[in-house]
Amino acid sequence: MELRSPLCVVRTYRAEDATSLAKHGNNRRIWENLRDRFPHPFTRANGVEYITHVLQNPDTPSFAIDVAGQAVGGISLHLGNDIERISAELGYWLGEEFWGRGIMTSAIGLVTEYALQERRLIRVFAVPFTTNVASCRALEKVGYQREALMRRSALKDGTVRDQYLYAIVKD
């Protein structure tokens, strides 16, 4: 799969992306805003393991964010099941040197459109930490609405933290 915008390409991972993912993903500032399943430090071996998993499970919608031919981040849909099969949680990260350029907003827009149109989902949501202002702004620019403050809902790096619940819904 490949989705294009003027700022980035969202595409299927390739085995050779592991080195670039390690280069851009091995950053504590990124790790601080992600779930613990994203390791820190993030090594090439972690990249190989993740890419292998995704490529062996083609129904897992997880993609590289590509800028100028390099995988500089990732974006995934965590599909709901059973009665929540009409929705998915959006997760994403981007290498720090690419922050502030509109790349993540573009990638979120591409994957959201894919989720609602191609996957025929009705709801896509994200739960950024309340302190991650840039992530909240990127979601809002694409049309996500803040639905809730989830007080004391997560434990990250030994600290209990608040999260927002953002969602976009297809009418």
Image (cartoon, helix red, strand yellow):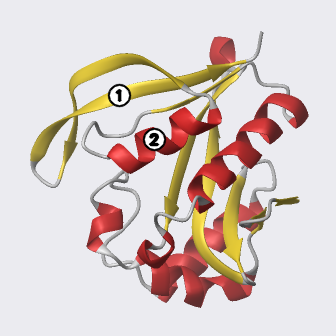
| Residue occupying the point 80% across, 29% down | 116
Give the residue type that dot 1 points to.
Answer: Tyr
| Res 163 quadrant in image | top left
As drawn, the label of residue 107 is none
Look at the numbered disc 2 and give the secondary structure of its residue.
Answer: helix
Location of mark 2 (residue): 137
Q: Is residue 36 left or right of residue 104?
A: left
Query: How packed is label 2: few (under 14 Cα within 10 Å), some, or many (20 or more)?
Result: few
* Residue at the image point whose x is 66% and y is 11% from the top: 83
Label 1 secondary element:
strand
Report the residue marked by disc 1: 164
In the rendered structure, the answer to whether residue 140 lies left or right of residue 56 reads left
131 up-or-down from 126: above or below: below
Position in image of residue 162 (x %, y %): 22, 31
Residue 35 coordinates in the image, percent (x, y): 37, 50
> Nearest the camera: 167 or 43?
167
Residue at coordinates 53% horizontally, 53% vertically from top-left? 92
